[in-house]
Image: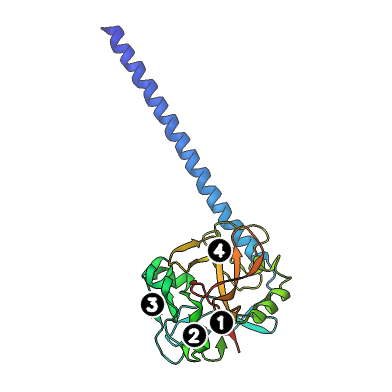
Amino acid sequence: MFYSFSLTIIITFLLFSCKKKEEKKSDTHNQIVKTEITDKKNNAINFSSSIKSIGQFGNGVTDIEGNVYKTVIIENQEWMAENLKVTKYNDGTKINIEPNSNNWSTNNQPTYCFFNNDSTYNSKYGNLYNWYVIKDEVNINKNVCPIGWHVPSEIDWNILINYLGGEKIAGGKLKEIQITSWNQTNENTTNSSLFTALPSGYRNNGGNFGSIGNYGYWWTSTELNSIDAYYKGMYSNSESISTNNSNKKLGLSIRCIKD
């Protein structure tokens, strides 16, 4: 009986010791994780503050609905430093919204949507627009950008890209640094232009959404033919910016440039 009682005490002591060791190990692990997160945030802040800016902030601009956008002056151009959020043309005319995928895929009228049909994305990423929002013949010469601003042509974009060193490296100078937005960043992602490009994803011409966090796409006002138009693309794993063309029914972001 005494032996059994002693054995019970010993087992209880060993179990208590193991539990303490596990708790200590868990506390140590949690502390390491917290330290790593803090270090990453501090490194991002220190890295950001050490970058020499190529651009400088402008006075900002307000759209027809009262949305206020930061602007940035890069060389002789002034750009919005945020994606367009407006749901009306600058004369007050409403733009159609289309949540339904089938309707989106067959639509050839000026239309916008929120990513994943979720309006909470609007604040950070802006809206996704099909190219018909831009096309003068379809929108009866209405302008989706604030008065005194316009959707940039491919030439407008190329002036910016060439000033920042060309397509192979300009994307890194245009992309926001924070890893909370882009799924990947590296030392060549500097946002030194202050353009703050975000990976706002897209809506394809079938009405499906994708690639938020990985890709950012922006329409140009330049069309290729009756079906396709040009856009610019940036990617989480690259410092490049590409020129592409695709169906005008795609839902992509818009950045405006001052006249």
Please name which of the two marks, 2 or 1, marks the residue nearer to the observer: 2
Q: Is residue 119 visible?
A: yes
Q: Where is residue 62 shown, x and y percent of the image? A: 49, 86
Up/down of 66 relative to 182, above or below = below
- The residue drawn where x is 39% and y is 29% is 19
**Left or right position of 17 against 61:** left
Label 2: state its secondary structure.
Answer: loop
**Left or right position of 61 against 49:** left
Q: Amino acid at mark 3?
A: Ile
Up/down of 40 relative to 124, above or below = above
Q: Where is residue 247 shown, x and y percent of the image? A: 53, 72
Q: Quadrant of the C terminus?
A: bottom right
> What label sits on residue 215 in the rendered view?
4
Residue assigned mark 2: 144
Comes first in the chain, label 4 or label 3 = 3
Residue assigned mark 3: 97
Q: Residues within 10 Å of mark 3 (few under 14, many from 20)?
A: some
Q: CA distance from mark 3 to mark 2?
A: 14 Å
Between 77 and 135, which is closer to the camera in this rendering? 135
Label 3: state its secondary structure.
Answer: strand
Q: CA distance from mark 2 to mark 4?
A: 23 Å
Comes first in the chain, label 3 or label 2 = 3
Q: Quadrant of residue 97?
A: bottom left
Please name which of the two marks, 3 or 2, marks the residue nearer to the observer: 3
Residue assigned mark 1: 256
Q: CA distance from mark 1 to mark 4?
A: 19 Å
